[in-house]
Image: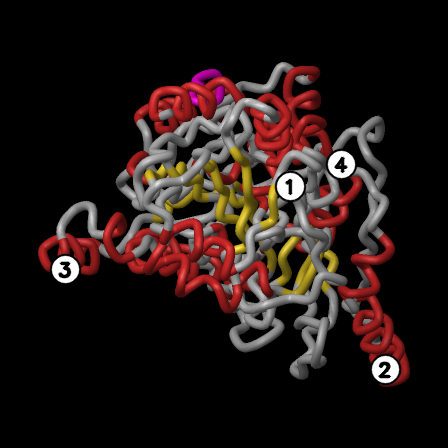
């Protein structure tokens, strides 16, 4: 399989495909050999590179940020070399050092340090910025992508456009056909709508990714902290991968680089426009986060960008497993257990909005002849999708003040979640209910449009 290399790389160098690399393949000229340590440091260290390739590159681009070393000839020299390399591989310290660095500097450091043993993971969305940054470093680079077999046609066309624009070949990884066949025959083509997306993603994405990463010592992702406050808010620019293994196997054998971790989405798009980078045509149709066709849709006014993925599931499930190391088992925004008010500030605060307790909403449910209709949001303050619609819901409360429609909120996470699911039709956060004036049964707002006009139209149609 051809590698994604820039034109600056000599045509004499033929790199192996992901998952098929053997150390004996790397018999290149002009290689500077480092020491192959047989021991692995715990914590944030990984095994050092066996060789770091220097490519021909323009001096006008980012300066060389990685240092290579000739193999020492004396025993004393070996000890000094080993000590220095180990210090360089403290990736927690490196993450602190690069915390305020630009994506270009981080990309340059990653490519310089790992050479042909690192590759960019490309999803076919705005992470094309990573390829542009890699090109700007002037270094050779590799790109791989997971073809699940269920991507949008626009994404496949975009892959082709990217290959032609950069003169590269993307290394595609495919799911195991026997596994896919077994899943579909046993559960159908759309089982994820009924029992969650994790099983399908495991077959079509996670396992192919695992195979790809076994041929690398590092990979580069487009994760950003603002993409998913619930799971990605603490993503560092570089880390030892907490989930997957690399070429040497075992814990700590793979490094994960996130060059745009500290960049906001708007700034990524400013960069793409400035550099005239090709983008997926789905973006112009309202798609922000792009995955498989059955599990991706455009985001609507008042929605967070990640809400276009697996919209039928809870906010805590908005990861497919590729970055499951972000998920903290004991965190409220992942498992729904209660957090203190000191940890998560409440939302939907307004003098025109009533906070309902469990007893309050149970009383509201029992009334068959209410004096006024009520609209109530079931929410969790840590949920990024609830946070995204806070402005429109507060505006709704202000507009309905004095109209005869009461506006309320009920915190439905933690201990209240089971009750909300069984009695209040809670599917995912946020859920909006209308309690009509002459009916005890609440009516669930069916649309994902959470702008003020859409909410008012729903209320007025049922008043």
Query: Which circle's residue, 2 or 3, is located before the other in the chain?
Result: 2
Res. 423 image quadrant? bottom left
Cα–Cα gap, marks 3 and 4: 43 Å
Left/right placement of residue 228 relative to residue 215 reads: right
Element marked by disc 4 = helix
Pointer 4: what residue? Answer: 104
For the point 30% across and 60% down, the residue is 199
Image point (72%, 72%), residue name: 45
x and y percentages locating residue 308 in the rendered image? 44, 35
Q: Nearer the viewer, mark 2 or mark 3?
A: 3
Q: CA distance from mark 3 to mark 1?
A: 46 Å
Q: Can you tell which mark lies on residue 79?
A: 2
Give the distance between the C-alpha atoms of the residues marked 2 and 1, in whole angstroms: 61 Å
Residue at the disc numbered 3? 182
Q: Which disc number belongs to residue 193?
A: none
Residue 69 place in picture, x, y as percent: 82, 62
The reply to whether residue 152 is in sight is: yes
Q: Nearer the viewer, residue 94 or 353?
A: 353
Q: Does the residue at mark 3 contact the one at mark 1 (Cβ under 8 Å)?
A: no
Instruction: Please tell me which of labels 1 and 4 falls first in the chain.
Output: 4
Q: Where residue 143 sits in the image (x, y, percent)?
A: 51, 41
Q: CA distance from mark 1 to mark 4?
A: 39 Å
Q: Nearer the viewer, mark 2 or mark 4?
A: 4
Say if 172 sits above or below 88 in the image.
above
Q: Earlier in the sequence, mark 3 or mark 4?
A: 4
């Amino acid at each position: 399989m051809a590698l994604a290399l820039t034109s600056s790389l000599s045509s004499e160098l033929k790199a192996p495909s992901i998952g098929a690399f053997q150390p004996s393949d790397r018999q290149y000229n002009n290689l500077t050999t480092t020491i192959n340590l047989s021991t692995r440091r715990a914590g944030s260290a990984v095994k050092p590179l066996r060789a770091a390739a220097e490519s021909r590159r323009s001096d006008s681009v980012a300066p060389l940020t990685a240092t290579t070393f000739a193999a020492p000839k004396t025993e004393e020299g070996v000890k000094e070399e080993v000590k220095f390399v180990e210090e360089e591989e403290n990736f927690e310290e490196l993450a602190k050092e690069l915390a305020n660095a630009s994506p270009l500097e981080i990309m340059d450091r990653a490519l310089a340090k790992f050479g042909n043993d690192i590759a960019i993971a490309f999803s076919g969305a705005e992470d094309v910025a990573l390829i542009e940054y890699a090109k700007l470093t002037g270094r050779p680079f590799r790109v791989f992508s997971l073809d699940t077999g269920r991507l949008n046609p626009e994404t496949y066309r975009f892959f082709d456009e990217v290959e032609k624009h950069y003169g590269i070949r993307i290394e595609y990884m495919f799911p195991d056909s026997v596994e896919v066949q077994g899943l579909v025959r046993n559960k159908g083509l759309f089982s994820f709508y009924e029992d969650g997306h994790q099983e399908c993603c495991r077959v079509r994405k996670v396992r192919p990714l695992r195979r790809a990463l076994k041929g690398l010592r590092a990979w580069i992702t487009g994760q950003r902290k603002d993409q998913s406050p619930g799971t990605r808010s603490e993503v560092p620019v570089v880390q030892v991968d907490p989930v997957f293994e690399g070429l040497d196997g075992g814990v700590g054998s793979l490094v994960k680089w996130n060059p745009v971790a500290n960049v906001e989405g708007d700034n990524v798009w400013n960069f793409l426009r400035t550099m005239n980078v090709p983008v997926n045509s789905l973006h112009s149709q309202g798609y922000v986060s792009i995955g498989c066709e059955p599990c991706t849709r455009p985001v609507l006014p008042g929605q967070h960008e990640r809400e276009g993925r697996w919209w039928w599931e809870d906010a805590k499930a908005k990861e497919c497993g590729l970055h499951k190391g972000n998920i903290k088992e004991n965190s409220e925004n992942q498992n729904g257990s209660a957090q203190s008010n000191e940890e998560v500030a409440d939302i939907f605060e307004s003098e025109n909005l009533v906070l309902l307790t469990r007893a309050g909403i149970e009383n509201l449910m029992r009334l068959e002849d209410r004096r006024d209709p009520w609209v109530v949001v079931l929410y969790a303050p840590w949920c990024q999708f609830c946070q995204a619609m806070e402005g429109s819901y507060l505006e709704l409360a202000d507009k309905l003040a004095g109209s005869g429609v009461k506006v309320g909120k009920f915190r439905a996470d933690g201990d209240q979640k089971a009750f909300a699911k069984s009695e209040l039709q809670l599917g995912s956060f946020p859920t909006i209910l209308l309690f009509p004036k002459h009916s005890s049964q609440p009516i669930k707002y069916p649309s994902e449009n959470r702008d003020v006009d859409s909410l008012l139209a729903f209320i007025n149609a049922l008043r």
